[in-house]
Image (spheres, rainbow, N blue to C red):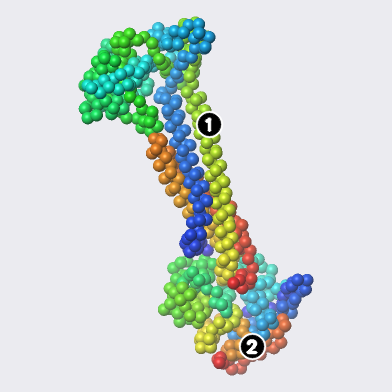
């Protein structure tokens, strides 16, 4: 007796009791859809978080965190993290390839009669390169902008939306704290999780910022190493050097993004486990439901089993028939669950703005799970069916 | 050829042991038409179940075409049953959710016959019993006589040596009973199929060439019927 014949028998008996079958599948549907959903969430979330936190290129950031005592001794040091001399010193470390700097502050940006508060980032050329800022239209900040301290600016999509409405910003003049700048480029709109954190930002050359505002503080330093292996050494050397220069003890530190990323993926891992165990319980309960309904089905079809045996069905064939039926039942439930879970993932990803990954392995996991449940919880009823006495079964009313 | 040697079947009823069959010796040759008669509780149905090895004897030997089958395993017996025995029951025992054609297909599914061949052979069997018009009917759309004819078609479709019929006319009126018994006679005479009919009706038994009387688990009489023929009132 072929597997196809068995599946046909299984489907017909599932369709005869539609309501019963659907109710039986419910536990499996809920279980599998939560499995699909959490795996999608876990994979998509972890990837997104990692790319967000680790950032582009092989870089480490330096942080400036003076201790309480140091601040009390010299309160002004809170405001002066990095100077231009610091940058030159760090650049002289052999392992360091590039030093990315930015000096960020809030300022008022005005175009005609519209004005908004925005992030003003005075960046160096390395910042553009390492962070891979791509312009959607116009051009990026060039070496000549930096060297000549030109009054050029690149804005992000958010600024365009908020400030310009229908006007093409390219070539227009905006005023940052009453200083005029020409817009030369507009950045691409970021996708996914980043878009929800997108704030209005105007990028201008650091040299221009310093010339215009007299500002000489640099807020952030990121180091890119020559080789990835040297990254940590480069970072530590830089921190050590800066502490030496400023006579501080441990105010300059390496911020290891990968550690943070790992910590976060551990958290998502724990969440996955919690929701996973809920899914597991639901699958267990669903499986018991399947077993229960299969036992009912065996009892109801006692006579059918007797007839099949009288016609020459072996016990093995009867066992296989009922096993196929329970697997078919859970597999259909699993497929519905996969559809529901994927739907839920799509809806949620639309809301929170990052993609939940529904990959082929995820679907295969879902199908595999439902099959295994069908087999585990189908064994007992199928075994009961195959051990029936043919004569008794034929007499069964 | 079926040979039973001192077959005994004992059931445990509470603390008591009841011998339903006692030392039965019986030989049925190929091509015979045998009726087994007896009052209810005489053991005739148990005898038939043992002949069709749905049941195993407590003691004794059973040779089918000279081969001892008592020691065979369940799955081997299922295979032999599928190939050599066709059952017909009083209550028809058709699967209610399958059409006449699908019901007739069943034994061939267990025999591993290919789909196309199954369709051809199932149609032929239904034509033989005169039901070619109602192949796609579900059992509940068929009359009692039609149901029994489907059951007979199902019994003959694997071309068995033996048809075992347990009270095949028990649920039918006399007119249909006649048709069914004539069908058995036709199968016996034209195909050479061995027919064993269990019945308590004299008129039904009269179709057989040989009538065996069973009472209290033993064969009390074994007659040849000189003039087999219909006698259903």
Q: Residues within 10 Å of mark 1 (few under 14, many from 20)?
A: few
Quadrant assignment, res B32: bottom right
Q: Of the numbered discs in the image, which one, if any, rests on residue A266?
A: 1
Instruction: Using the rendered image of the protein, determine whether residue A115 is visible from the camera's viewpoint.
Output: yes
> Which residue lies at the image location 44% right of the left edge and 47% below the top edge?
A340
Query: Foreground: B3 or A388?
Result: A388
Q: Secondary structure at mark 2?
A: strand
> Which residue lies at the image location 31% right of the left edge and 10% below the top edge?
A213
Q: How many marks?
A: 2
Q: Indicate which label's residue lies in the foreground, 2 or 1.
A: 1
Query: Foreground: A233 or B112?
Result: A233
Indicate left or right for B34 with B121 as reference.
right
In the depicted structure, whether residue A89 falls above or below residue A137:
above
> Which residue lies at the image location 39% right of the left edge and 13% below the top edge?
A218
**In the image, residue A369 lies at what x, y percent?**
53, 48
Q: Residues within 10 Å of mark 2 (few under 14, many from 20)?
A: many
Q: Chain of mark 1?
A: A
**In the image, residue A191 lies at what x, y percent?**
36, 32
Q: Chain of mark 2?
A: B
**In the image, residue A203 lies at what x, y percent?**
31, 19
**In the image, residue A293 lies at what x, y percent?**
56, 59
Q: Of the numbered discs in the image, which one, if any, rests on residue B53?
A: none
Query: Foreground: A373 or A6?
Result: A373
Quadrant assignment, res B47: bottom right
Q: Of the numbered discs in the image, which one, if any, rests on residue B211?
A: 2
Residue at the farthest right position:
B15
Query: Foreground: A15 or B149?
Result: A15
In the depicted structure, whether residue B86 falls above or below residue A128:
below
Instruction: Using the rendered image of the protein, determine whether residue B26 is visible from the camera's viewpoint.
Output: no
> Which residue lies at the image location 51% right of the left edge and 34% below the top edge?
A268
Q: Quadrant of the C terminus of chain A?
A: bottom right
């Amino acid at each position: 007796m072929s597997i196809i014949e068995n599946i046909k028998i299984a489907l017909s008996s599932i369709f005869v009791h539609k309501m019963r079958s659907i109710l039986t599948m419910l536990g499996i549907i809920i279980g599998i859809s939560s499995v699909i959903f959490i795996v999608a969430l876990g994979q998509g979330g972890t990837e997104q978080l990692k790319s967000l936190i680790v950032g582009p290129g092989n870089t480490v950031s330096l942080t400036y965190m003076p201790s309480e005592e140091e601040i009390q001794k010299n309160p002004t040091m809170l405001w002066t993290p990095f100077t231009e001399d610091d940058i030159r010193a760090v650049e002289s470390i052999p392992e360091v390839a590039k030093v990315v700097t930015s000096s960020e502050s809030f300022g008022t940006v005005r175009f005609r009669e519209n004005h908004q508060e925005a992030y003003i980032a005075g960046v160096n050329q390395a910042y553009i390169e390492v962070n891979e800022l791509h312009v959607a239209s116009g051009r990026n900040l060039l070496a000549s902008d930096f060297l000549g301290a030109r009054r050029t600016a690149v804005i992000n999509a958010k600024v365009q939306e908020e400030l310009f409405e229908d006007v093409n910003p390219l070539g227009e003049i905006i005023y940052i704290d009453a200083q005029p700048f020409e817009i030369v480029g507009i950045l691409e709109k970021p996708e996914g999780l980043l878009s929800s954190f997108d704030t209005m930002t105007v990028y201008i050359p650091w040299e221009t910022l310093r010339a215009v505002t007299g500002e000489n503080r640099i807020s952030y330093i990121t180091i890119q190493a020559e080789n990835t292996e040297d990254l940590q050494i480069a970072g530590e050397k830089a921190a050590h050097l800066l502490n030496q220069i400023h006579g501080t003890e441990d105010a300059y530190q390496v911020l290891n993004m990968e550690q943070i990323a790992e910590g976060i993926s551990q958290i998502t891992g724990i969440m996955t486990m919690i929701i996973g165990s809920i899914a597991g319980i639901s699958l267990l309960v669903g499986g018991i439901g399947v077993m229960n309904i299969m036992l009912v089905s065996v009892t109801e079809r006692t006579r059918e089993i007797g007839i099949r045996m009288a016609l020459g069905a072996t016990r093995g064939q009867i066992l296989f028939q009922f096993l196929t039926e329970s697997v078919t039942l859970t597999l259909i439930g699993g497929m519905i669950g996969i559809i529901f879970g994927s739907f839920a993932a799509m809806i949620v990803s639309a809301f929170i703005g990052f993609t939940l990954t529904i990959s082929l392995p995820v679907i295969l996991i879902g199908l595999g799970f439902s099959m295994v449940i069908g087999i585990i919880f189908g064994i007992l009823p199928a075994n009961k069916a195959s051990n029936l006495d043919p004569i008794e079964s034929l007499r069964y009313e | 050829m079926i040979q039973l040697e001192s077959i005994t079947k004992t059931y445990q009823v509470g603390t008591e042991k009841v011998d339903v069959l006692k030392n039965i010796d019986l030989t049925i040759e190929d091509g015979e038409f045998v009726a087994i008669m007896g009052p209810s509780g005489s053991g005739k149905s148990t005898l038939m179940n043992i002949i069709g090895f749905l049941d195993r004897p407590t003691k004794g030997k059973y040779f089918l075409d000279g081969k001892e089958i008592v020691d065979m395993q369940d799955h081997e017996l299922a295979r032999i049953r599928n190939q050599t025995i066709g059952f017909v029951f009083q209550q028809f025992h058709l699967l209610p959710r399958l059409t006449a054609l699908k019901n007739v297909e069943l034994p061939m599914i267990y025999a591993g016959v290919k789909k196309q061949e199954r369709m051809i052979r199932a149609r032929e069997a239904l034509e033989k019993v005169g039901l070619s018009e109602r192949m796609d009917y579900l059992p509940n759309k068929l009359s009692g006589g039609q149901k029994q004819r489907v059951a007979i078609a199902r019994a003959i479709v694997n071309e068995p040596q033996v048809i075992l019929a347990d009270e095949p006319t028990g649920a039918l009126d006399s007119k249909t009973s006649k048709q069914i018994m004539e069908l058995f006679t036709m199968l016996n005479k034209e195909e050479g199929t061995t027919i064993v009919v269990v019945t308590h009706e004299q008129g039904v038994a009269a179709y057989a060439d040989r009538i065996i009387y069973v009472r209290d688990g033993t064969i009390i009489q074994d007659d040849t019927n000189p003039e087999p023929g219909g006698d259903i009132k």
